[in-house]
Amino acid sequence: MAKVCCVCGKGKVAGNQVSHSNKHNKRTWSANLRNVRVVEDGTPKRVKVCTRCLRSGKVERA
């Protein structure tokens, strides 16, 4: 299973790590995901959900 939020689709983001001497190195940021039991179509299911979706109430927890 990919490290992607099942609600909003938020996943890894790539960019540069910039040091004080302005050197650029590639790096990634991962989404803050939690394994949560969610009610989908009346049945509980384990899915990965980002904390933003949990906090805003976009999912119904089992």
Image (spheres, rainbow, N blue to C red):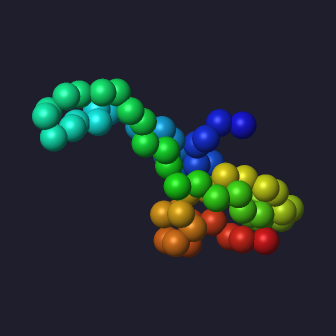
Residue at the outermost left position:
21
* 32 over 11 or under it: above or below: below
For residue 28, which quarter of the picture? top left
Task: Say whether residue 11 is left or right of residue 13.
Answer: right
Q: Residue at x 43, y 42 (%)?
A: 29
58 relative to 50, above or below? below
- Residue 41 can be seen, yes or no: no
Residue displayed at 53% across by 63% down: 51
The N terminus lies in quadrant:
top right
Relative image position of residue 20 (x, y in whole percent): 15, 40
Q: Position of residue 47 (x, y in %)?
A: 72, 53
Identified at 29% across, 36% down, the residue is: 17
Q: Is residue 53 left or right of residue 22?
A: right
Residue 32: image x %, image y %? 52, 55
Q: Quadrant of residue 38?
A: bottom right
Q: Say which residue appears at 86% left-offset and 62% top-offset.
A: 43
The answer to whether residue 45 is left or right of residue 26 is right
Tell which of 19 and 4 is nearer to you. Answer: 19
Q: Count up the numbered dots.
A: 0
**Residue 20 visible in the snapshot:** yes
- Which quadrant: the C terminus? bottom right
Q: Residue furthest right?
A: 43
